[in-house]
Image (tube, rainbow, N blue to C red):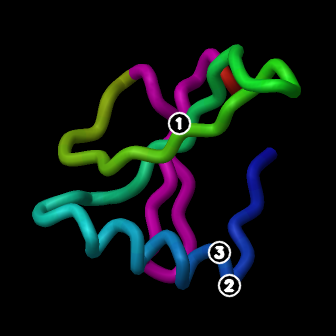
Amino acid sequence: MITITAKAAEELKKRTAMGEGAIGVRLSVTNKGCSGHSYQMEHVFEPSPADDRFERDGAVLFIPRTQV
């Protein structure tokens, strides 16, 4: 289960606004870096059926289903 805090929702809305026309932010994890994992955030302009969608207070977070 993913919980978006009020503070995280504020930050997600700010980051979404940075991408003109973005509807949310996608958070994904890749295998690299010293710890073996690297986090990546990118703007989402169209929802993908491969993502789960989480919302709070107008903030939208997408996470690939393979990573939940």
* Residue type, numbered disc 1: Asp
Few, some or many residues within 10 Å of mark 3 (<14, 14–19, 20+): few
Percent from the top left, x then y, of residue 47? 29, 39
**In this view of the protein, which residue sits in the foreground, 29 or 50?**
29
Tag 2 secondary structure: helix
Counting from the top left corner in percent of width and height, residue 33 is at: 73, 24
> Which of marks 1 and 2 precedes in the sequence?
2
Q: Amino acid at mark 3?
A: Ala
Q: Of helix, strand and loop, which one carries label 3?
A: helix
Indicate the quadrant where residue 34 lies: top right
Q: Which residue is mark 3?
A: 8
Checking the image for residue 15, the label placed there is none
Labels 1 & 3 near each other (Cβ < 8 A): no
Residue type at mark 2: give it: Lys
The numbered disc on residue 52 is: 1
* Crowdedness near tag 1: few (<14), some (14–19) or many (≥20) residues, C-alpha within 10 Å: some
Q: CA distance from mark 2 to mark 1?
A: 21 Å
Residue 7 falls inside the magenta stretch: no
Residue, x 64% and y 38% (percent of image)? 39
| Badge 3 vs badge 2, beta-carbon distance below 8 Å | yes
Q: Which residue is identified by label 2?
A: 7
Q: Is residue 61 magenta?
A: yes
Q: Is residue 8 left or right of residue 17?
A: right
Residue at the spot x=54%, y=84% of the render?
A: 10
Quarter placement of the N terminus: top right
Establish if 11 lies above or below 19: below
> Mark 2, mark 1: which one is toward the viewer?
2
Q: On screen, 33 above or below 28?
A: above
Q: Which residues are magenta?
A: 50-66
Indicate left or right for 5 with 64 as reference: right
Q: Secondary structure at mark 1?
A: strand
First in sequence: mark 1 vs mark 3:
3
